[in-house]
Image (tube, rainbow, N blue to C red):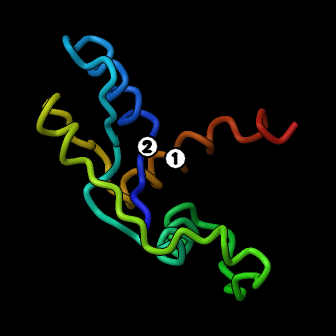
Amino acid sequence: MRNVIYVEDAVAAIILTSQAKKMAGETFFAVGDEHFSVAKIAAATVEHIGSGRTRFVEWPRDRKSAEIGDAIISNKKIKEFLNWTPQYNLKSGLIKTREYYENCLKEYLR
């Protein structure tokens, strides 16, 4: 399972952490509240971005040792220490991403 984080949420977390006292050496995960499989993220991306498709393939046997399984990363600590909360969920973050790229995609495809 994977957590999803959006740029604005990540930037807010970095700013909060940099301004907090006695946070040196601490580790925080600025991730969303929900956990999604890679397949769910891919399907939601196609749905909310409005193009593309998903295709499922078997994980290569020679890469089995690189598969991390169902790792779950929690945002509990950053919420408790810094009162941080994600502002976007999977759907709203993908819609915001689509809106951003609609205006400047040509610049990225040069």
Quadrant location of residue 15?
A: top left
Q: Position of residue 26 (x, y in %)?
A: 30, 28
Tell me the residue at 43%/43% (across/down): 6
Residue in front for this viewpoint, 81 or 86: 81
What label sits on residue 9 in the rendered view?
Answer: none
**Residue under label 1:** 97
Q: Are marks 1 and 2 in contact (CB under 8 Å)?
A: yes
> For the residue marked with disc 1, what is the amino acid?
Thr
Quadrant location of residue 65?
A: bottom right
> For the residue marked with disc 2, what is the amino acid?
Tyr
**Residue under label 2:** 6
Tell me the residue at 70%/82% (across/down): 59
Task: Give the SS element for disc 1.
Answer: helix
Location of the C terminus (image quadrant): top right
In the displayed structure, would residue 44 be above or below residue 31? Answer: below
In the displayed structure, would residue 66 be above or below residue 84? Answer: below
| Crowding at mark 1 (Cα within 10 Å: few <14, some 14-19, many 20+) | some
Location of the N terminus (image quadrant): bottom left
In the displayed structure, would residue 15 be above or below residue 43? Answer: above
Residue in front for this viewpoint, 21 or 79: 21
State the CA–CA distance, disc 1 to disc 2. Answer: 9 Å
Residue in front for this viewpoint, 51 or 65: 65
110 relative to 104 in the view: left or right: right
Task: Give the SS element for disc 2.
Answer: loop
